[in-house]
Image (cartoon, helix red, strand yellow):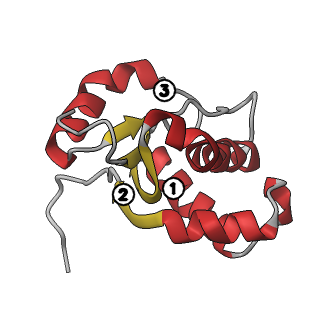
Amino acid sequence: MGHSDTAPVPVVVFVYGGAWGSGDRSIYCLLALQIAKELNASVLCPDYSIYPKGNVLNMVQDISDSLLWVREKGQTFSLDQDNIILIGHSAGAHLCALSTLFLVNNAEELFIETNIQRDLVSAIKGIIEFLQWLCSMEPMTS
């Protein structure tokens, strides 16, 4: 979107929410397009395993694999492999944080070589998380 063919484009990996057990990236197409326009970036919205077919580790592995894909294949699509922003909504925000923590700690469970995990961490330039909280409308009492 507005980039020359030679300049690599920053990457936003948007991880949608769904209480760990629902959600689908197709719901977020318009949001991804708006993020791309506002940030002048390419937006990837990976699907990930959801409960009960997958557990939290499987979800973290899926998100980490999407980051690995950017590093390995991004150049083919003129993506800036060293300029990744993670944006997560609700459960997706938790997955962004957990995936980053797993990578920072060189987790063997990701099945990604340690030096590649370090490269992924250095490519992550920021994490933006949107969490939803249920708030009571009842007045607080002392």
Q: Are marks 3 and 1 in contact (CB under 8 Å)?
A: no
Quadrant in which the C terminus appears: bottom left
Q: Nearer the viewer, residue 90 or 66?
A: 66
Residue annotated with mark 2: 129
Q: Kindly tell me whether residue 131 is visible in this rendering.
A: yes
Q: How far apart are marks 2 and 1 (CA)?
A: 8 Å
| Front one among 111 and 102 | 111
Point out residue 133 in the picture as x, y percentages from the top left corner. Answer: 32, 53
Using the rendered view, name the quadrant where residue 4 is placed: top left
Decide: marks 2, 1 in contact (CB < 8 A)?
yes
Q: Residue 96 carries which label?
A: 1
**Dot placed on the residue nearer the N-terminal end, 3 or 2:** 3
Q: What residue type is labelled 3?
A: Gly
At mark 2, the secondary structure is strand
Local packing at callout 3 (Cα closer than 10 Å; few below 14, some 14-19, many 20+) is: some
Looking at the rendered image, the quarter that the N terminus falls into is: top left
